[in-house]
Amino acid sequence: MARLVLGVGGGIAAFKSAHLASLLRKRGHRVRVILTPAAAQFVTPLTFESLTGEPVYGDLWDPPRYGDDGEILGEAHIHLARWGEAALVAPATADLLGQLASGQARDGLTTFLLAFGGPVLLAPAMHHRMWAHPAVQESVARLQRFGYRFLGPVAGSLASGEEGWGRMLEAQELADLFEDHLHGRDLQGKRVLVTAGPTQEPFDAVRHISNPSSGKMGYALAQAAFGRGAQVVLISGPTCLPDPYGVEVHRVQRAEEMYQEVARRFPEVDILVAAAAVADHRPKEFHEGKIRKEDLLFQLELEPNPDILKEMGRRKKKGQILIGFAAEWGMDEGSARKKLLEKRLDMVVLNDVSGPGEGFRADTNRAFLVTAQGVQELPLLSKRELAHRIFDAAKDLPGGGRPGGGR
Ligand code: C5P
């Protein structure tokens, strides 16, 4: 669990930051909030103090304060810069971005940001014309050069009642993304391709063969890789999930389409994670229109689908890492090892889909990570946490990720 600093700028989106502070605390982090004087007009320090159980920092000229353990919070902003492990500014207003880009330190938050050496994420929120203004865009480009990472803004309804590009991400999304960034930037500069979800193999206009994969594991992997600095492409079968932030998503229906999308990109990829539950077979024939119910009692003739992962294993070049999944009814390490060899994989994530809270549809998963080097048994974890454990383990593989640069 981390010591996090949440900087809040003076915009109406500050109300979402109260929820964000509360979410981060519930996830076990210590959260200290620092408000600009303008932010304190929108949400009071007391709100944040109550939600985080920590002192709230404000104006540069506030008298020195003391923490619970008698710790002196005088020179508060420098003290906070030493205390925090990572920082998120939400909302980051046009004024804040401008100040930070030009190295100004007029209030407590900008003073803290200049003094802070850890990773900083910026979540802008403003009117769409302000966001599009060349001065703001120049600040953004400058801050990106300095190593700051931006989360949003996204397009949507704005406080002015207009629609446009300038809306802050929701608290839940920011909390997830902030946590994903806490694992470092070891995939910086790497290209990661992820497959996710089920495939659907239609035999008439309204019917198909499929499986109950929700896509949650693959989406968590794509989001985790983005958080760790990778350039991520997700090839997804049909799911109800929204596109993960910062990830290029291509949606397909059939295994054959997934195969084409993966094969086209594979030569450029550093890591392929195949989390999709690809249908092994497809109906041999497709009937135009809808087959009448009475005529459905025919025998469905099937033919095999391409094994996407196996084919990529065949094409694998030195340095490329292939990670596959094995969903088993019970833990069958032998079959995972067989898969490792047969498909020329670097890691098999073996998971038992028979237990409650595991495998298809669940938010949690219990897995064994099987590599040529050995087996790592993991406890029941959220799919997001498991995604990070998989990339942690991938670092130790021969040719695995090396730590990247950046803030
Ligand atoms: O052989 P099995 O289907 O158990 O292998 C599972 C692994 O292979 C998963 O990583 C899955 O995404 C991948 N796979 C594939 N194409 C298939 C079948 C499985 O990429 N046709």
Image (cartoon, grey):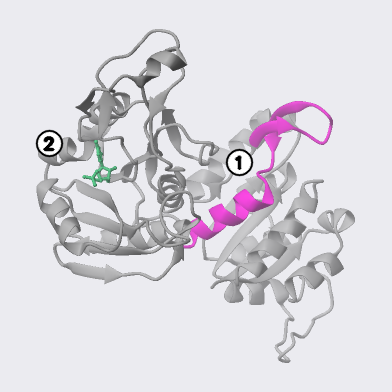
- Image check: 135 left or right of 370? right
Any atom of ligand 1 within 8 Å of the CB at mark 1? no
Q: Work out whether 101 lies above or below 65.
A: above
**Dot 2: within a 10 Å radius of its alpha carbon, few (fewer than 14), some, or many (20 or more) residues?**
few
Q: Is residue 204 visible?
A: no
Q: Which residue is mark 1?
A: 152
Residue situated in front as seen by the camera: 256 or 173: 256
Residue at 20%, 30% in the rendered image: 306
Residue 321 painted magenta: no
- Image check: 120 left or right of 353? right
User: Which residue is farthest top?
Assistant: 288
- Which of label 2 and label 1 is nearer to you? 2
User: Which residue is farthest bottom?
Assistant: 70
Q: Amino acid at mark 1?
A: Gly
| x and y percentages locating residue 251 in the rendered image | 43, 28
Residue situated in front as seen by the camera: 247 or 234: 234
Q: Is residue 34 visible?
A: yes
Residue situated in front as seen by the camera: 1 or 250: 250
- Image check: 307 left or right of 294? left
Residue at 24%, 55% in the rendered image: 348
| x and y percentages locating residue 373 in the rendered image | 15, 67
Label drawn at residue 65: none
Q: Which residues are magenta?
A: 154-183
Label drawn at residue 315: 2
| x and y percentages locating residue 343 in the rendered image | 14, 45
Q: Label 2, label 1: how many angstroms apart (C-alpha)?
A: 37 Å
Find ligand 1 in the image and state its quadrant.
top left
Question: In which quadrant will I find the N terminus?
Answer: bottom right
Q: Amino acid at mark 2?
A: Arg
**Dot 1: within a 10 Å radius of its alpha carbon, few (fewer than 14), some, or many (20 or more) residues?**
some
Q: How many marks?
A: 2
Dots 2 and 1: beta carbons under 8 Å? Answer: no
